[in-house]
Image (spheres, rainbow, N blue to C red):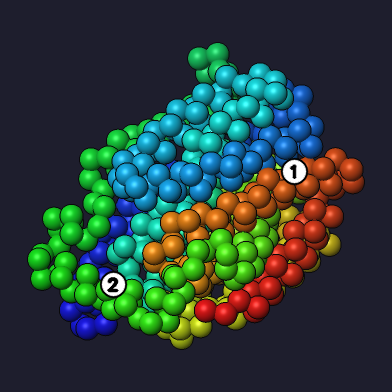
Amino acid sequence: MTADAASVVRKVRARLVPFLFLLYIVAYLDRINVGFAALQMNAALGFSGRTFGLGAGIFFLSYVAFEIPSNVILARVGARIWIARIMITWGLVSSATMFVRSAPEFYAARFVLGAAEAGFFPGIIYYLTHWFPPHERARTVAAFMTATLVAGVVGGPISGALLTLDGAAGLAGWQWLFLLEGLPAIVLGVIVLAILPERPAGATWLTPVEREALDAALRRDEADPAIAARIAGAPYRDPRVWRLAIVYFTIPVALYAIGFWLPQIVKGASGRSNFTVGLLSAIPYVVGAIGMVIAGRHSDRTGERRWHVVAAALVGGAAFAASAAVGSLVPALMLLSVAMLGLGSMFGPFWTLATSVVGRTGAAVGIALINSIGNIGGFVGPYLFGWIQDATHSFAAGLFFIGALLAAGGSLVLTVRE
């Protein structure tokens, strides 16, 4: 990359990533806020651990079912229109969850929310391939995906504070949580429709010379013979794509099992107020966000992807498993913070490896395929965690399970060649 192209990439990153980062914070918060709502909702509606785990995870069944069609539509109609549609509809559904009164209604609300949001994350990853050359993507994806952890940082205190509105205007605290946390998605969806550029050619904040330099850098990568060979075959016929999907399956198992159950784990270990639980639950996410950024930058600097994923998976898996052996708050939070450090460090290198494997031409379907199959873990993790918690009346076995699975799945990436 020439110096001019490098400066353009920095400019694009500074312009796009903060906005996309904000969008993903809202998306992830609307997925996991049910974990904080459960601190009141489960008792109010009589939900068992298994019922809650099934409802929390069922989001991913519809998300998986509609993800590939959604991403194909995005590639045809453009990111601006389709991402706006996704955000507005999921915001409406998220707010409407305040009206849930029974387990079947809870399941239905989560299923519809998954269908509404389907295609958002892989759509953003696909969108980034039109703006960043491959060797710049790990740090970009990592910067974007720190939103998953920053959502936990800001979402915990906010959700805990909203639960204190219990009884205001005749609504329970968990109802206020769903109502108010769904509104930002609607507002941001309208903003996306108004300002998000599709490709560099439509970016009025780039000069003609800057657009030409960026397009040239992207064309050089696209014309590389090795990349051309990779994109010649359909992604769904490539065994490496399926292996990556299996690897990715283990990441949402851990991410969402903890995302949905962490408030209850902290509540059980501390006995503190819901607001304090929100503050304490933010700590592992802070550590994970730091690790995600550092690992993404180191992976880009060295050009190595697979061992970054493996090392992070082993550290995260070991910490999750070790947390099962402690019962007091401080050591549990320390180990869960290390676990989130490992888990967060996997994302940037993993998705850079994945986009290299599928190539730019096959990116829309390939990324959606990996994410769809992988996100089945988003159903399996919370549901099995709830089932294990009901059966053992403890979180320990569930923590050991997700730790072992993460370590094993991450190691599988060594079988994938770029």
Foreground of the two, 344 or 177? 344
For discs 1 and 2, the disc positioned in front in the rendered view: 2
On the image, the x and y values in percent for residue 348 come to 49, 68
How far apart are the two marked residues, 1 and 2, measured between alpha carbons? 42 Å
Q: Secondary structure at mark 2?
A: helix
State whether residue 335 is above or below residue 281.
below
Kind of residue sitting beneath label 2: Leu
Image spot of residue 277 (x, y percent): 63, 44
| Residue 413 shows in the view | yes
Residue 376 pos. (x, y %): 66, 50
- Three-letter code, disc 1: Tyr
Q: Which residue is mark 1?
A: 383
Look at 58% across and 51% down and name the residue there: 372
Q: Nearer the viewer, residue 272 or 257?
A: 257
Q: Residue at x 22, y 70 (%)?
A: 215
Residue 83 in percent (x, y) is at: 37, 43
* Residue 287 visible to the viewer: no
Task: Work out whether 69 lies above or below 405.
Answer: above
- Residue at (46%, 44%) from the top-left corner? 70
Q: Which residue is mark 2?
A: 218
Say which residue appears at 62% left-offset and 56% top-offset: 374
Q: Earlier in the sequence, mark 1 or mark 2?
A: 2
Q: Is residue 101 left or right of residue 208?
A: right
Q: Residue furthest left?
A: 208
| Residue 187 location, quadrant | top left
- Quadrant of the image for the N terminus? bottom left
